[in-house]
Image: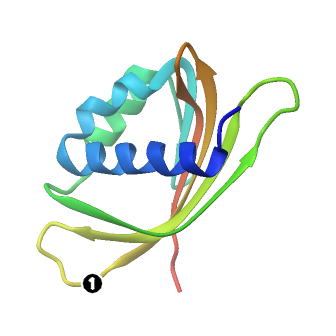
Amino acid sequence: MGDINAIAKQFTDFYYQTFDADRSQLSALYRDMSMLTWENNPIQGAKDITEKLVSLPFEKVQHRVLTLDAQPASASVAAILVLVTGQLLVDDGQNVLPYSQMFHLVPEGQGYFVQNDVFRLVYG
């Protein structure tokens, strides 16, 4: 396994840049067995996950990553757990929305896919 922190940073940079530009393009990162829990709402499968992300009630979004932690997720497979905390700016709003997101990345070919994804807004 390569440097998991570098892999996690590369993945999250790509994920959030793609999310902010065109959420529909994130479908390539998920598989039929992938699961997203969005604010306590479980969704399974690349198609349904993408539909959820595309249907979110905002036009523009900007992610600001504040922290990024990565750990090996398995002794036998080069899977990685990634925990992100950050802030969202949506549409033309001035108020930031704190969030946390966890990704379980599983190796496939020369890259990784998202097996599990848990997203939560953090309310103070």
Residue in front for this viewpoint, 91 or 73: 73
Of all residues, the one furthest to the front in this rendering is 2
Going by the image, does 89 lie left or right of 122? left
| Position in image of residue 59 (x %, y %) | 13, 55
Residue appearing at x 64%, y 27% in the figure: 106
Going by the image, does 80 lie left or right of 50? right
Q: Which residue is mark 1?
A: 95
Rendered view: 4 above or below 35:
below
Q: How many marks overall?
A: 1
Q: Element under label 1?
A: loop
Residue appearing at x 47%, y 25% in the figure: 30
Rendered view: 81 above or below 100:
above
Q: Quadrant of the N terminus?
A: top right
Residue appearing at x 32%, y 80% in the figure: 96
Snapshot quadrant of residue 52: top left
Rendered view: 5 above or below 67:
above
Snapshot quadrant of residue 10: top left
| Position in image of residue 61 (x %, y %) | 22, 60
Going by the image, does 24 lie left or right of 110? left
Snapshot quadrant of residue 103: top right
Rendered view: 123 above or below 99:
below
- Residue type at mark 1: give it: Asn
Of all residues, the one furthest to the right in this rendering is 75
Crowd class of label 1 (few under 14; some 14 to 19; many from 20; radius 10 Å): few
| Position in image of residue 71 (x %, y %) | 74, 49
